[in-house]
Image: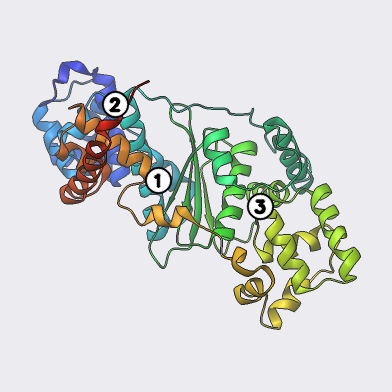
Amino acid sequence: MVDLNELSSQEIGRRLRIARENAGVRQEEAARIVGVSRPTLVSIEQGVRRVRIQEIQALARHYGLSVNALLRREAVHTDLVPRFRRLREAEDAETTEAVQLLNDLIKAEVELENLLGIQKGRNYPPERGINSGDVVMLAEQHAAELREWLGIGLGPIADVFSLIDRQLGVRLYQRRLSSTSKVAGLFSFDEGIGASILLNANHPLPRRIQSAAHELGHFFGTRQSPEVLETDERFLSRDERYANAFGRSFMAPAESFSESFRRIMEITGKITARLIILLADEYHISRQACCLRLEELGLAKKGTWGWFENRGGITDEHAREVLGESAIVRDPAKTDADRPLSHRMSLMAHAAWKRDLMSEGQLAELLKISRLELRGIIDQIELEERETDDLVELPD
């Protein structure tokens, strides 16, 4: 059992409040569970009244947590769920699922990092803000500023995921949501944890690339507000119109994208499916995003993409006819999303287990997987390590 004296009353109260809010439990219900008045529960959550171990046990059980998970010194207690809940006018199961998954992923990753003494580097540019001015013009300007700040020029971006995760230090997760989920992505920012993005790994790679660029817009322009991106988003709000325009501008800067278009048009003389395929492939975006960007820049007539769609669209088969085998793009994130844990989380879980920092039971609870799945991951890494033990005997 964790020693209650290791944590202050204020910290225990904060953790209890976050656990209650994440579980969607009202203060009146929580007070009834432990047989106290609502003002007394408020005092406990504020750290004014010291909580008793029996009360912690009852509340933790009601919130679906173990006492150990609630009080462990290194435990990370994030409050993304209520933060997103306040954002949404109407909460739905799909959004709740995605937010809870992001919350769980952040909590597990940060707690393991803390245990292992790993610090994820941050390379955050200043938040720009979008309180005044035309949001589309702002988005174009800010996308160019971020590219300049990163030193990547105006050309195509080969791997926007690595740029977000490694160059900027934003926590990026690509995991599968339920098959009916309309959620394409989530963005959250917390001063202690940093910026985090979750992408729906069920979606095709080009769509996830555009979703990632969209969420990057929230990171750069409107960092303090959590955001849910849905597949049928109409981009009516100022924040959403900005992020959508930022995503298009960041992936396909007007200057270089227009030049690439004109270079092909000099040969074709007109817009064709082949032109769209080649240009989309060059900039690593979807064929729809490519065509709509051409319309936005006045390089194609409004309604061009609709014209293609009415004639069957520009399909993957068309792309294979033009690009050959290169049209089949490797998508390691989908493979990783099929694993119980990502490769990085698997390595950290094994390291925490091997150093006796956490038991199998504690790790399984933290990572939201079964002990059998965890044991399979640990055994596999252990076997790999034993197979390379002879490396240490090689001469320097």
Which residue is outermost to the bottom?
311
The amino acid beneath tag 2 is: Val
Instruction: Rate crowding at label 3 as few (under 14), some (14 to 19) or many (20 or more) other CA atoms within 10 Å.
Output: many
Taking the spot 61% from the left edge, 54% from the top edge, the residue there is 210
Q: Are marks 2 and 1 in contact (CB under 8 Å)?
A: no
For the residues labelled 1 and 3, the Cα–Cα distance comes to 21 Å
Mark 2: which secondary structure? helix
Relative to 131, say whether 3 is above or below: above
Locate residue 104, reporting x and y percent.
33, 43
Locate residue 41, reporting x and y percent.
22, 31
Which residue is outermost to the front?
395
The numbered mark at residue 244 is 3
Say whether disc 1 or disc 3 marks the residue closer to the N-terminus.
1
Relative to 340, say whether 18 is above or below: above
Say whether disc 2 or disc 1 marks the residue closer to the N-terminus.
1
Mark 1: which secondary structure? helix
From this viewpoint, is residue 14 visible? no
The amino acid beneath tag 1 is: Leu
Within the image, what quadrant is residue 124 found in?
Answer: top right
The residue identified by callout 1 is 102
Q: Nearer the viewer, residue 176 or 29?
A: 176
